[in-house]
Image (spheres, rainbow, N blue to C red):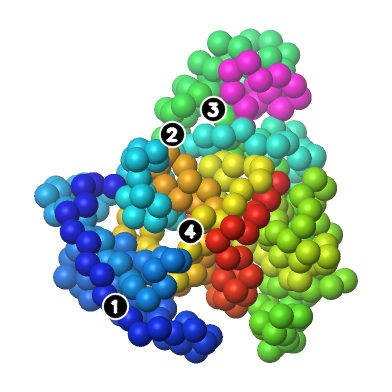
Amino acid sequence: MQGVDRVTAVALPNMTSAADHRRRLGLGLALGAVIAAAGVGAIVTADEGQADTIAITAEAGDQSTEESTDETSAPVADAASAPVGLALPDLEGELGQNEVEPTVPVEPERADGGCTIGAQSIRLASQGDGVACLQQALADEGLYDGAIDGDFDDPTLAAVVAYQEQTGLFVDGVVGRESAIELGIWPDEDMLVVRTPPPPENTPDSTGYYLSPVASVGDDAPPLPENSGSGRRVVYDRAGQRVWAVDDNEQIVRSWLVSGSKYSNEAPGTHTVYSRSEMSTAWNGQAFLPNMIRYQQTQIGHIGFHGIPRHVSDNSPYQTTDELGTRLSGGCQRQHDLDAEFLWAFADVGTTVVVT
C-alpha cells in the first residue's frame, strides 16, 4: 500500500445479535460509500478485539492518475513490520502476478483426454510427466525444439519465458495455473468440483444457520479430503473449491462451495485464524469484503474467507452464486453470504484452518 496518512475511528454501539451484525455491515458499507464518493481510497474494517469500532484508513493522496487507477499490480509491504489488519491489505481482485507457490498435484485429467501438468506449479529442475506435457505444448507453439524428456532444464525455461512474454502473462519462468490454462494443459477444473443439489430454501444446519444454495450437511456433504487434520477445524480444498466446517466429534457441520484464488498464493498446510473484520475492502479499494476471516499472511497481504465482494461504486456483487466453485479471486475465498454468516459464527480467532 501507499503510505497511510491518517486513521479515523468511528465508535459504534455494542451490538451482538444477528440483526445487529447485519446493521453493522450496512453501516460499514455506508461509510465506505461516503469515502468512495469523496474520491479517497479506503479500507473499512471492524476488527475482532475492537468489536465496537470501525476503522477507516485513508491512503495518502499524492499519486498520479495512472497509479490511482491501476488494477493490475498489487502493493508490496513488509509483513514483519505490518500491524495485522491495517498496513497489509486483503488480497482480492487482479494482482498482476502468476502462480508463486508450488501446489500438491492432483490426478491429471482433461475433458478432451489430453495431457496436463496437474494442478500444480512447475519450474526449473521440476521433472515428470507434467514437464513432458509442457515441453510438447511449447513445441506445438514453435518455441521449443529440445527433447520431450520431462526435465525442466534451461532450454525449457527459455521457452516458458518466451511464451509468457509473447502472451502478456506475468514473466517469471514458472508454469502455474494461468500459464497452463493459456497453453491448454491445466486440468479441467469442473471435473474436480463436486456440486450438490441445492437444499430447500430456509433449511437450517445443526447450528441454526440457513444453508446457501451451494451448501450441504450430513450425508449430502462430500467426504473430507485425505490428510485434512483432526479436531474442530475449517478445511479448504483448493482443487475442489470446497470448504468444510468440522466439529470436535469429527462431524461435518456444513460444507459449501467457494471461489478461491486464481493464483497459487493459498499455501497448503495448517493455519490459524488470527484476525477478523465484519467489513473490509480489497487492496485496490474497489470492493467491499463482508465477514473477513484472515488465516494467512503473505508478503503483500492477507488471505481469508469472506462474503461475495461488492463493488464500492454501486454495491453490486462481483459474481453470482452459480459461479461459486470457480476460481475468481486474487487470494481470498469468496462465499455465499449465508455461508459467510455461518463461518463468522463458527471460526473465531484461534480456529484451525487446514488447506489441502
State which tag comes first along the sequence, 1 or 3.
1
Residue 11 is marked as 1
- Label 1: few (<14), some (14–19) or many (≥20) C-alpha neighbours in 10 Å: few
Q: Residue at x 61, y 33 (%)?
A: 102
Residue 174 is marked as 3
Residue 257 is marked as none
Magenta region, residue range? 121-138
Mark in front: 1 vs 3: 1
Q: Which residue, given by chain and number where applicable, does mark 4 sit on?
A: 275
Where is residue 168? Give x, y as percent. 41, 35
Residue 167, placed above or below residue 248? above
Q: For the residue marked with disc 2, what is the amino acid?
A: Phe
Q: Residue at x 62, y 62 (%)?
A: 258
Q: CA distance from mark 2 to mark 4?
A: 31 Å
Q: Under tag 2, what secondary structure?
A: loop
Q: CA distance from mark 3 to mark 2?
A: 9 Å
Specify whether 162 is left or right of 57.
right
Q: For the residue marked with disc 4, what is the amino acid?
A: Ser
Say whether marks 4 and 1 touch (CB < 8 Å).
Answer: no
Between residues 73 and 11, which one lies in front from this camera angle?
Answer: 11
Say whether marks 2 and 1 touch (CB < 8 Å).
Answer: no
Q: For the residue marked with disc 3, what is the amino acid?
A: Val
Specify whether 65 is left or right of 270.
left
Q: Under tag 3, what secondary structure?
A: loop
The answer to whether residue 57 is magenta is no
Q: Which residue, given by chain and number where applicable, does mark 2 sit on?
A: 170
